Amino acid sequence: MKIGLLGTGNLAVALGSAWASAGHSIVVTGRRPDRAKAAAERIGDAATPLDPGELAGQAEAIVVAIAWDGLEEALKLVGGADGLLSGKTVIDCTNAVDYATGRLLPETGSAAELVAEVAVGAHVVKALHLFAGASWPFTGERSASPVVALCGDDTDALSRATALIRDLGARTAVLGGLTAARQAEEAAGFVMRVVAAGANPRFAVPDVVRA
């Protein structure tokens, strides 16, 4: 599959590198062409930098890994507001969280719902926002593999996102439609506050054992 990365930071590069290793081709764009070129070089030969306006026509699925304060601008640069992403699977990895307090920044709804609003007609799936880039690919025992929560309204988009996440070495759990994304995004704030308190968030939620 040809995967489009809208974002040039560490998470985008880590995901792109993992998917390239799994046999996918990668195209990369962002608000700055020089950073898109540098990100593609870090990913390797499977990656190509693009101008923002080329992304919709090149990518089969698009992964949004943009800082919250630049999210809407970046989506407009790739033609989201003009309907160029209509029908595309768009995986939103945005952390719309105040890193100092853990507070979710959208007063209502979620970052994922903003993506769906700006990227007219796109099939948005919330996923991968709870994991740092260093998590991917996961190469350990499957019984210990990470579980990535998904939220989305389109069945085909959820299936495509699930297949891509499995290529990272992870498992998936669908939480519900896109209205569930706010809860998923608030979980990121919880994790950050646990880390800020000096604890490992891995142990902050008890295991549930079914009889």
Image (cartoon, rainbow, N blue to C red):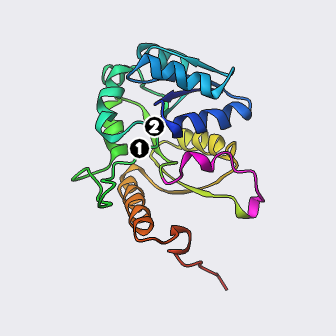
* Secondary structure beneath label 1: loop
Residue 207 falls within the magenta-colored stretch: no
- In this rendering, position of residue 209 left or right of residue 11: right
- Number of the label disc, if any, that sits on residue 104: none
Q: From the viewer's perspective, is 43 left or right of 55?
A: right
Amino acid at the residue labelled 1: Thr
In the rendering, at what x and y percent does residue 49 appear?
54, 17
At 56% across and 45% down in the image, what residue appears?
A: 133
Which residue appears at 40% of the width and 71% of the height? 197
Q: Amino acid at mark 2?
A: Ala
Magenta span: 130-143
Q: Position of residue 54 (x, y in %)?
A: 47, 13
The residue most toward the right is 141
Residue 43 higher or lower than 33, as above or below: below
Q: Residue 126: x and y, percent? A: 46, 46
Q: Are marks 1 and 2 in contact (CB under 8 Å)?
A: yes
Q: Quadrant of residue 168?
A: top right
User: Could you tell me what secondary structure mostly forms the magenta stretch?
Assistant: loop
In this figure, which residue is indicated by the disc labeled 2? 65
Left or right relative to 132: residue 83: left
Residue beneath disc 1: 94
Q: Residue at x 39, y 48 (%)?
A: 95
Q: Residues within 10 Å of mark 1 (few under 14, many from 20)?
A: many
Foreground of the two, 203 or 2: 203
